[in-house]
Amino acid sequence: MNLEIIEHNLVEKIDVGIRNSFSNFLYQSPEYRNRFLQSSYKTAFDGYSFIGQKDSLNQYETDLLHSFVLSDLQSVDRFPKEFSSFLTNEWPKLITAIKKIELQLIRKHNLPFEKLYEEDIIRYMMSCNYYPKPTRCALFNKNTTRLSTHSDVSLFTTFPFGVATGLSYFNSDKKVEVKQTNKMITFCGYYSQFMSYGELNALNHQVELPTDLNSERYSFAIFSIPKPDGIFYLGKEKLSGTDYYKKYLSLF
């Protein structure tokens, strides 16, 4: 399974809500934003990352974006106040819908992952991504992409509100550009490849530089991941979610 494009009926106000929350956070001072770096959380991938940061877990220092990773691994009050309303009112509905879709995909494709849900291993995180105008980024001239080629840490990655122009992926080394859509897109991450012994391929993807170098871009992706202290087995090997994160990060 490479890429599924799915009609969705998620209410549009959720997209507006999280975009406004993230924009309001980005309008705050650098001093305020830096109070919420990943090093402040030390939980999975949660926290803020910025352009030029050397120690982000989810982007390279040359990538041209600011991101904030939210998750259900900790309480709402641990995150910036700008996200409180979204996490309290909209996040639960969003995750319920996505979990239902993931289970439908698992059954449709006869994938060996349903036990992970039954044993309460799976949790969810969202990456909120803002790509400024490339011409305003000091690292722009060094880049051929906005976001470097990578596979995700997830079992599944879902763009619940569709995608803007710029997303591309590789299929047998051939680059495929995803057309802008407001339909939900779901694909396999590295955890699917890991748990299927390589029978499933994690989707390698990237975000291209735009033709209009004065254009901004937002994206919101949700990832199903093993909870850090969740225990699962790969054959006879006993692993925790944290063990898996280390194996994933060793790829980069």
Image: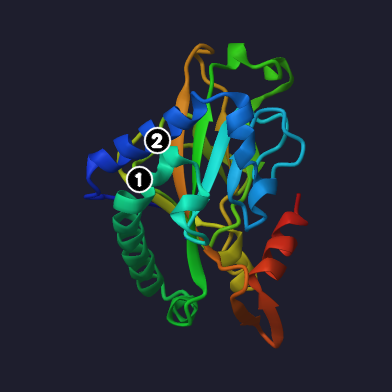
Q: For residue 86, which numbered disc appears in the image?
A: 1
Q: Amino acid at mark 1?
A: Phe
Foreground of the two, 32 or 13: 32
Q: Position of residue 148 (x, y in %)?
A: 65, 36
Does residue 112 sit above or below 105 in this rendering? below
> Which residue is at 52% across, 75% downward?
121
Does residue 103 sit above or below 189 in this rendering? below
Q: Say whether marks 2 and 1 touch (CB < 8 Å).
A: yes
Q: Amino acid at mark 2?
A: Ser
> Which residue is at 60% across, 41% downward?
36
Local crowd at mark 1 within 10 Å, few (<14), some, or many (≥20)?
many
Does residue 67 sit above or below 39 in this rendering? above
Q: Position of residue 65 (x, y in %)?
A: 59, 29
Query: Separation of disc 2 and disc 1 at Cα?
Result: 7 Å
> Which residue is at 54% across, 21% downward?
132
Does residue 57 sit above or below 44 in this rendering? above
Q: Position of residue 151 (x, y in %)?
A: 61, 50
Say if residue 179 shows up in the picture: no
Q: Does residue 144 appear to the left or right of 26 in the view shown? A: right
> Which residue is at 60% across, 72% downward?
195
Q: Which residue is mark 2?
A: 21
Local crowd at mark 2 within 10 Å, few (<14), some, or many (≥20)?
some
